Amino acid sequence: MPARMSSIIIEAQRKKTIRCVEESSAKRITGFESWLSRFSKVFGSVTNTSFFLFLALPIQSLFPYLYFMIRDLKVAKEEQDIGFYAGFVGATYFLGRTISAVPWGMFADKYGRKPCIVISILSVIVFNTLFGLSTTYWMAIVTRGLLGLLCGILGPIKAYASEVSRKEHQALGISFVTSSRAIALVIGPSIGGFLAQPARKYPKIFSEESIFGRFPYFLPCLVISVLAVGSCIACIWLPETLHFHDDDKVEAIEELESQVGGSKSTENLLKNWQLMSAIIIFSIFSLHDTAYLEIFSLWAVSSRKFQGLSFTSQDVGTVFAFSGLSVLVYQLTIYPFLSKFGPIKTFRPAAILSILLLTTYPFMSNLHGLELKILINMASVLKNVFAATITIACNILQNTAVTQKQRGAANGISVTMMSTFKAVAPAVAGIIFSWAQKHISGLFLPGNQILFLTINMVSIVGLVLTFKPFLSLPNPMRH
């Protein structure tokens, strides 16, 4: 009997030990899974930033050399017409993106963000390279259009930025995405400004008979495509976020979001005025930003006789790169202010200051030398800081208006409308720029002053729309 009791006690102790080991092992596994989950989110945020970077690089690298590319393609009969043709090259990319934005958003909601991102990066590799090999104006138009059509990364990336971050870190997550635009403003213009026409700029390294001499705008496109290959390889380890949360967590998140922005799970997104008002405002400022980049790059390199600055492509690249670097530093500090004061209280001052700043631009053509370079760089830094603030605020307004399951489609609608405005912006900006150069001595105002006044009118419209009754806000955001 004692022997039997002893064996029972030993067996009980053995089972207890096994149970303790299993529980300890389970805790270790849970801890590992938790660490792995955190690592995936961090990796996702960093990689997401690089993806948005390679979306922005083909756009930002184009502006420093676009004027010279159109001139070398010999499509413009007069020097004043270069801006007209340059505008349509910039517009075709955004036109292609407009056509495909909603289908890409639906694709991302159904099949995941990752496949959409991979296809978009591949399109950058192929069509950006072909654009650099363009020998005719129409080849440049077609390759840019196809690049925009197949580059459906913008909407899914914004949804990804929100999903990979906790709610309290949402502004920071979106700030990472917007930071990549600042990085692109540093790298893109530097690549375009310093690597375009390499045979002329660096004759000791590149000969006129080489491929870079025969295709003077191929090198900057090739560099971007090579960098995009590395980003495409990184997609292998990219975590998918469409099914990132289990059902209970998604339900809890949607319930929390419904308290902030109202439940939109059963409503048509187009009838969600909180979303649509934010998208319209974002689109207007996207039009403004794109028109500004187009006009500044054309105005800066145009001749002094047309009240331009007579800059080289390197000069334009340096201005954009310096302002991009400053914005990158600025965005490391902006998200706490957005979290504390809300998007509207940061949005409106940035828009007002941007309008005041642009009124000074036409008078800079009267400056020369070091004075001009210092002031134009300071103005460019401030302009891009204001633009970054507005962009982050608009992204927050947009993403808080819908649930997680709707973000892909919502961002698809946003990209469609935004790309429509961006497609119009370069074409209209190019037309107005050409008109301004032909009317330097206007009846009321000189052509260059009318040029920047037109851009400012767009900002004024966008600013007015941030007030009632147009903009719809959830209660916590009404300041």
Image: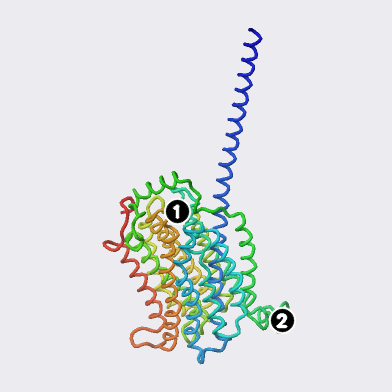
Q: Earlier in the sequence, mark 1 or mark 2?
A: 1
Secondary structure found at label 2:
loop
Q: Position of residue 161 (x, y in %)?
A: 49, 55
Examine the rendered structure and indicate whether residue 397 appears above or below residue 314: above
Q: Residues within 10 Å of mark 1 (few under 14, many from 20)?
A: many
Q: Quadrant of the C terminus?
A: bottom left
Residue 130 picture quarter: bottom right
Q: Position of residue 236 (x, y in %)?
A: 62, 56
> Which label sits on residue 210?
2
Residue reaching furthest to the bottom? 77
Examine the rendered structure and indicate whether residue 69 appears above or below residue 98: below
Q: Position of residue 153 (x, y in %)?
A: 51, 64
Residue 479 visible in the snapshot? no
Instruction: Name the foreground residue: 371 vs 475.
Output: 475
How far apart in space, not on screen, are marks 1 and 2 (Cα)? Answer: 48 Å
Residue at position x 43%, y 69% from top?
Answer: 416
Instruction: Name the foreground residue: 323 vs 36.
Output: 36
Left or right of 62 in this view: 222: right
Reading the image, the residue beneath label 1 is: 171
> Which label sits on residue 82?
none
Count the numbered circles shown.
2
Tag 2: residue type?
A: Ser
Q: Position of residue 238 (x, y in %)?
A: 58, 55
Residue at position x 36%, y 65% from top?
Answer: 281
Residue reaching furthest to the left? 469
Secondary structure found at label 1:
helix
